[in-house]
Amino acid sequence: MPIALSNTTVNRSVLIAGFLIAAFNPCIASAALGEPEASVMADVTVMRGTLMVVDSANYRSHEIKTSSGIVVHEFTGVDGKVFAIVWRGPAMPNLRQALGQYFDSYIAAAKGNRSGNQFGIHNSDLVVHSAGHMRAFSGIAYLPQAIPSGVSIGELQ
């Protein structure tokens, strides 16, 4: 015997299902440039890594290590937002995840902007430097306008 549901019941069920999927799917709410510090834990889950947090005077470093040897540092400022991401390892991390809302800008700038094993973008809102070859990749991505006062890009490792 079919059960009759009202549109309100169906809409409410769809809405609740959407919230549950978003809440329990770490890929949807992962840390990325410009995102809140609390979202770093989603990256730890997605990367199946271990986390070590180190406080500095002007920022906090979240080091994520994976079993495959990839190391990603996500730096957050006193405002609680991720302002830089540094990586190294035998493979590239998921840059769509790491760059978040800046990924499309990265892809647009990347077209025709590669020189051998190196790549770089230097825009007013996004800087990315990446280099490497098989089993040895490294890079940095940061938001120039979000770097905390007194922090040098050179000290982010």
Image (cartoon, helix red, strand yellow):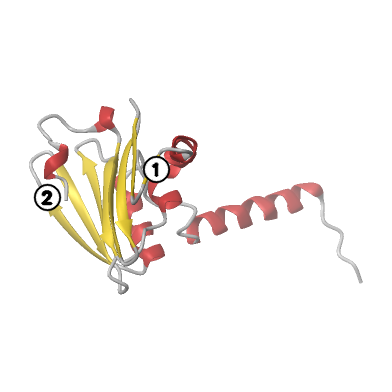
Task: Please give the name of the residue rendered at 30% of the width and 69% of the height, measured from the top-left corner.
Answer: 66
| Residue 133 on image: x %, y % | 33, 60
Task: Please give the name of the residue rendered at 87% of the width and 59% of the height, measured from the top-left corner.
Answer: 4
CA neighbours of label 1 inside 10 A, class few (<14), some (14 to 19), many (20+): some
| Residue 153 on image: x %, y % | 17, 38
- Considering only vertical position in the picture, is 142 above or below 55? above
Quadrant the N terminus occupies: bottom right
**Residue farthest to the front?**
116
Q: Quadrant of residue 91?
A: bottom left
- Considering only vertical position in the picture, is 98 above or below 80? below
| Residue 33 on image: x %, y % | 35, 42
Instruction: Determine which of the numbered discs, if any, sits on residue 88 in the image.
Output: none
Q: Is residue 7 left or right of residue 37?
A: right
Residue nearest the viewer, comparing 21 with 153:
153
Q: Indicate which label's residue lies in the foreground, 1 or 2.
A: 1
Q: Are marks 1 and 2 in contact (CB under 8 Å)?
A: no
Task: Please give the name of the residue rendered at 22% of the width and 54% of the height, measured from the top-left corner.
Answer: 62
Q: How many marks?
A: 2
Secondary element under disc 2, as helix, strand or loop, is strand
Q: Is residue 6 left or right of residue 39?
A: right
- Considering only vertical position in the picture, is 127 above or below 117? above
Secondary element under disc 1, as helix, strand or loop, is strand
Which residue is identified by label 2? 55
Q: In terms of sequence position, does the residue under pointer 1 or pointer 2 come before the other?
A: 2
Residue nearest the viewer, comparing 49 with 111:
111
Which residue is identified by label 1? 114
**Residue farthest to the right?**
1
What kind of residue is marked 2?
Answer: Asp
CA gap, disc 1 and disc 2:
35 Å
| Residue 73 on image: x %, y % | 24, 54
Q: Can residue 86 be seen by looking at this rendering?
A: yes
